[in-house]
Image (cartoon, rainbow, N blue to C red):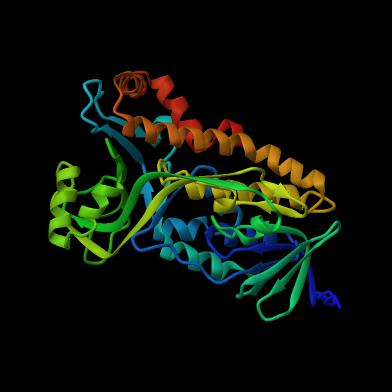
Amino acid sequence: MADAPVIPAETFDVIVVGAGLVGLAATLGFARAGLRVANVGRPERGGPGRTVALLGRSLDFLEDLGLREQVEEQGAPLCGMRIVDDSGSIFAPRPVTFRAREIGRESFGWNIENARLGPLFEAALVGARRFQQEVVAFDFGADRATLTLADGSAIAARLVVGADGRSSPSRKAAGIDATTRGFGQTALTLQLRHMRDHDDVSTEFHTREGPFTLVPLPPAPDAPYRSSLVWLMRDASYARIGALDDSALIAEIRRRAHGFLGDMAIEGARGAFPMTVQRVSQLTGRRLALIGDAAHAFPPIGAQGLNLGLRDAQTIVAEATRAADPGAETTLAAYAAARRPDIMTRTLGVGLLNMSLLAGFGPIDAARGLGLAALGAFRPLRRLAMREGLNPFLAR
């Protein structure tokens, strides 16, 4: 005898699956737009030492959500971005610094600790239902989707937004394929106190094993100068460096940073995670839209990951809000068409930069060096690159 269907206790316009930063931002966006929205999932926290540089449209989205002022109060402004080719290539150009004032802005964005950003989203979730448990079954029907929760209850909506991470149960339930490729690299993340002022400038050293990036953080009562570090290295290097004690690791970090921030100390715990790229065969399924890491995932290079996910959230909120049926095929098609070019170009750009550093091939080094030198020498080209970085043409 077949099991009787589970009858939903509540029906919503939208259910967002996933309580990470992108899922919470999307939930808040739907709630502020006046849709009946539920968020399902256990609260997530970023790994130790993780921060996020919020740029361009991400800040515009946060302003729409009523959170920009709080982010700026708890973050550090990024008034400049410096790129240093530290690959050892004979074609290495001089360092290039991009200044926000060149394009009439006070800053490119703000860097904030993940541990601070999540609670800001959660505190703002007024008007949204929260179900802090797992989804055990998805049924994507023609006119609505029904989700069965771990406690046996069920909820339904016309649109499900899958913000449930790289392993995305919602994506798998919809039969959407994903391919994952590793780079043989690990990212070490931590936060630092240092003696010299960062001058609100992020510095990214391009090394043969990947970028080594120092990003400003706001001062602490007993530490006026602080930065976050994201250090990509080959797995074999991490096996050695990750085993160092704090004093030995600080010496290694100072050497890699060429001592430009002076004496340093590690603040809090370290984090580490493998570098992979993941692509999905499609961004939508019946009554389902994928956002964030459920839709795309790649290394933390150029502050693209979360910013890309927030653009996903902003777009699906806009498309669903103006549609009579937020989960209709036309709504989902419009979302996919709007997001696919931005995702493809950003994923390709990040992948090419990373692979160009790892390759160590003369012609590739020459092309990379020539491109960076051109950005340093030609102000109109540099301004164009800065504007495109903040507001991608293909994401407009």
Q: Quadrant of the N terminus?
A: bottom right
Query: Residue at coordinates 85% horizontally, 56% vertically from top-left?
Result: 142
Where does residue 392 sit, x and y in percent of width and height? 55, 34
Residue 8 lies, with reference to residue 321, above or below; the image says below
Residue 114 lies, with reference to residue 105, above or below; the image says below
Q: How many marks?
A: 0
Residue 7 lies, with reference to residue 164, above or below; the image says below
In the picture, measured across the screen, residue 137 lies left or right of residue 308, that is: right
Residue 173 lies, with reference to residue 338, above or below; the image says below
In the picture, measured across the screen, residue 291 lies left or right of residue 268, that is: right
Q: Is residue 396 visible?
A: no
Query: Residue at coordinates 46% horizontally, 66% vertically from top-left?
Result: 45
Where does residue 233 sit, x and y in percent of width and height? 29, 45
Query: Residue at coordinates 75% horizontally, 65% vertically from top-left?
Result: 36
Of 132 and 242, nearer the camera is: 242
Of 117 and 187, nearer the camera is: 187
Q: Is residue 146 visible?
A: yes
Query: Residue at coordinates 58% horizontally, 31% vertically from top-left?
Result: 393
Q: Quadrant of the C terminus?
A: top right
In the picture, measured across the screen, residue 93 lies left or right of residue 306, that is: left
**Residue situated furthest front in the rendering:** 1
Where does residue 23 sit, x and y in percent of width and height? 59, 60
In the picture, measured across the screen, residue 1 lies left or right of residue 185, that is: right
**Residue situated furthest bottom in the rendering:** 151
Of 68 and 271, nearer the camera is: 271
Where does residue 220 sit, x and y in percent of width and height? 28, 64
